[in-house]
Image (cartoon, rainbow, N blue to C red):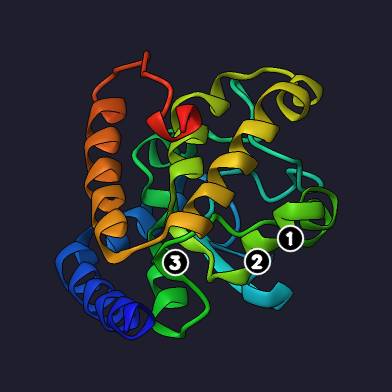
Amino acid sequence: MYGFFKRCFDLLFALCFLAVFSPIYLLTWIIIKIVSPGPAIYKAKRVGKDGKLFDCYKFRSMRVDSGKVKLTTLQNDDRIFPFGKFIRRAKIDEMPQVVNILTGYMSVVGPRPEDKDNADKVYVGEYKHILDVKPGLTSTASLYDYTHGELFEDEEEYEKVFLPKKLQLELYYVNHRSFRYDIQLILRTALLIIQKTYGRKKFKEPEELKL
């Protein structure tokens, strides 16, 4: 029953989101086309449920010639153009993924989808179970990355210090997912986006890490 209601909620959420925020979609598309040469929408191969690849859509926040995909986006990443920094901070860059939700490759809540090369590296051992569910727009781990992971300036340090905690949180969601938890994470996401967009920099560690 959870799976059925989750899918119904995903469809309703995506349709309402598109209807309400369509002006922001249009404005973001126009500004990107003006300030940075290249397509406004970035399409990337990501690993979804059961390891299946799909095209994940984002508003482009980096230069077209930004190079290979890294494990994460670090603080002061010089690949990001100025307007791109804003849409990343406000999470506007992720908004096109409602199309992925409508087509069934993603859910509103679920582990963030990884690039294939990164997925082969991190989804090993017990963490293979992260691929048992659809990836999502938000999760406990993605919020932790949003508030803490993006503060790292060195990819090696991020991989050693932060990534294990992030994977632990993704697995926690897989093992404790419920409709109630999904709603809680959606509300938590909205609050954190508002706080970070308006300049808040310090956030507490997620309670799930203590459980």
Q: Check disc 2: other Cα within 10 Å, few if <14, some if 14-19, many if 20+.
A: many
Q: What residue type is labelled 1?
A: Lys
> In the rendered structure, which disc, 3 or 1, sits on the residue that comes first in sequence?
3
Q: Check disc 1: other Cα within 10 Å, few if <14, some if 14-19, many if 20+.
A: some
User: x, y percentage for residue 20?
Assistant: 15, 66
Left or right, 164 with respect to 108, comes to right
As drawn, the label of residue 97 is 3
Q: Which of 52 and 210 is in front in this view?
A: 210
Q: Is residue 204 above or below residue 165?
A: above
Q: What residue type is labelled 3?
A: Gln
Q: How far apart are marks 3 and 1 (CA)?
A: 23 Å
Left or right, 37 with respect to 71, comes to left
> In the rendered structure, which disc, 2 or 3, sits on the residue that comes first in sequence?
3
Q: Are marks 2 and 1 in contact (CB under 8 Å)?
A: yes
Q: Tag 1's secondary structure?
A: helix
Residue at horizontal 76 percent and vertical 26 percent from the top: 155
As drawn, the label of residue 128 is 1
Left or right, 74 with respect to 41, comes to right
**Total of numbered circles in the picture?**
3
